[in-house]
């Protein structure tokens, strides 16, 4: 009898549907994967794994939210193919709750794949730990496997925090700083449409981190929405935010309490994202009007020395051109003088 998946949390139901689609693709690509081979594999697993206790899949409690690896459609298809070819190699890891029910600790993707393949029961082992320890162990395992998008990683971190982990613990487990952990946890507070954009890869997480420097929720959300609409990457957002903050800083000189109520027209936002700061004169130009050149320290010093004499770049160019012209004219004068007057001799 098929497992009734309605008892599972909604995100789990959604993933099971995704596994169903992956199985359809697998069957269309591999004629060896069919109802007959799947049924034989299930029967063989029941025999070969008889040394383990078994549990009906619909009796397993799946706590939510919980950290687990989110697989791509291709990875889901690979997992299904592996189970059909090699069997249920690793039992599910369950934890016994105070009410006597068995709760999933590790193996969510295997559980979902087996439901789709038609397994009614699964081998399992008991994890002898309390809820807090089980959740923290699950986070560590799934982080090591890798999360497919930053939102799932952030949700797993939030679940670990709720279970008793500290931000310092998460920093140690992930190999990042506490500040990085704090930034990741903020992703949990984003509107659903922004989370969906991060999950789908429409924007990288760095776009959100850069937008957060605007320090105002409305401005941050406006910037992220603009990035989604215009297809900005991290670099575009980085330049936009830096230039916008410079603009705000200049406005605050005249009005210390100034803070913009919005980011301005979309056209102006696009212009700010294209501005680049010259490393010599410090002025801002459109990206099409600047060059990225390799320049040595000596040449930089020459340019900086000229800028000290004349800070205005246009006037500095005129200064250098006039100096070079005068130098060449002087050289020509000395050459002609020597030619027509000959070398000067001292009078006795």
Image (cartoon, rainbow, N blue to C red):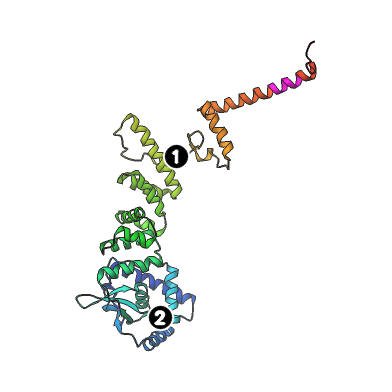
* Residue visible at 28% across and 61% down in the picture: 161
In this rendering, the answer to whether 344 lies above or below 104 is above
Name which of mark 1 and mark 2 comes first in the sequence: 2
Q: Which mark is residue 89?
A: 2
The x, y position of residue 27, in whole percent, is: 45, 77
Quadrant into which the N terminus falls: bottom left
Query: Where does label 1 land, which residue?
Result: 271
The secondary structure making up most of the magenta span is helix
Tag in front: 1 or 2? 2
* Residue visible at 32% across and 80% down in the picture: 124
Quarter of the figure with residue 69: bottom left
Asked if the residue at tag 2 contacts the one at tag 1, i.e. Cβ–Cβ closer than 8 Å, the answer is no
Q: Is residue 182 or residue 109 the one in the foreground?
A: 182
Q: Secondary structure at mark 2?
A: loop
Q: Is residue 311 or residue 113 the one in the foreground?
A: 311
User: Can residue 319 be seen in the rendering of this structure?
Assistant: yes
The x, y position of residue 165, in whole percent, is: 28, 62
Quarter of the figure with residue 38: bottom left
Quadrant into which the C terminus falls: top right
State the CA–CA distance, disc 1 to disc 2. 57 Å
């Amino acid at each position: 009898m098929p497992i009734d998946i309605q008892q599972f949390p909604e995100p789990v139901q959604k993933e099971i549907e995704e596994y169903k689609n992956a199985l359809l693709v697998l069957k269309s690509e591999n004629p060896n994967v069919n109802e007959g081979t799947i049924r034989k594999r299930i029967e063989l697993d029941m025999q070969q794994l008889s040394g383990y206790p078994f549990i009906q899949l619909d009796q397993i409690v799946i706590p939510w939210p919980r950290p687990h690896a989110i697989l791509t459609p291709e990875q889901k298809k690979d997992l299904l193919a592996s189970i059909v070819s090699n069997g249920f190699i690793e039992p599910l890891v369950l934890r016994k709750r105070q009410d006597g029910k068995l709760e999933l600790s590790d193996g969510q993707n295997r559980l979902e794949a087996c439901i789709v393949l038609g397994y009614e029961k699964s081998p399992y082992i008991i994890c002898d730990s309390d809820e807090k320890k089980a959740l923290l162990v699950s986070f560590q395992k799934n982080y090591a496997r890798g999360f497919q998008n930053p939102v799932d990683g952030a949700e797993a971190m939030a679940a670990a925090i709720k279970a008793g982990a500290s931000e310092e613990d998460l920093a140690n487990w992930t190999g990042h700083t506490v500040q990085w952990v704090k930034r990741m946890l903020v992703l949990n507070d984003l509107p659903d449409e922004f989370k969906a954009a991060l999950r789908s890869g429409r924007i990288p997480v760095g776009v959100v981190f850069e937008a957060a420097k605007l320090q105002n929720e409305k401005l941050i959300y406006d910037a992220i929405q603009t990035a989604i609409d215009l297809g900005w990457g991290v670099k575009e957002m980085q330049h936009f935010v830096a230039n916008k903050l410079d603009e705000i800083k200049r406005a605050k000189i005249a009005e210390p309490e100034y803070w913009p109520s919005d980011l301005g027209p979309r056209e102006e936002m696009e212009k700010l994202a294209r501005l680049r700061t010259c490393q010599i004169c410090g002025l801002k130009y459109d990206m099409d009007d600047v060059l990225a050149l390799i320049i040595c320290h000596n040449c930089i010093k020459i340019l900086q020395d000229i800028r000290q004499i004349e800070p205005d770049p246009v006037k500095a160019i005129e200064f250098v051109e006039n100096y070079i012209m005068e130098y060449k004219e002087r050289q020509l004068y000395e050459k002609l003088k020597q030619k027509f007057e000959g070398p000067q001799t001292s009078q006795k």
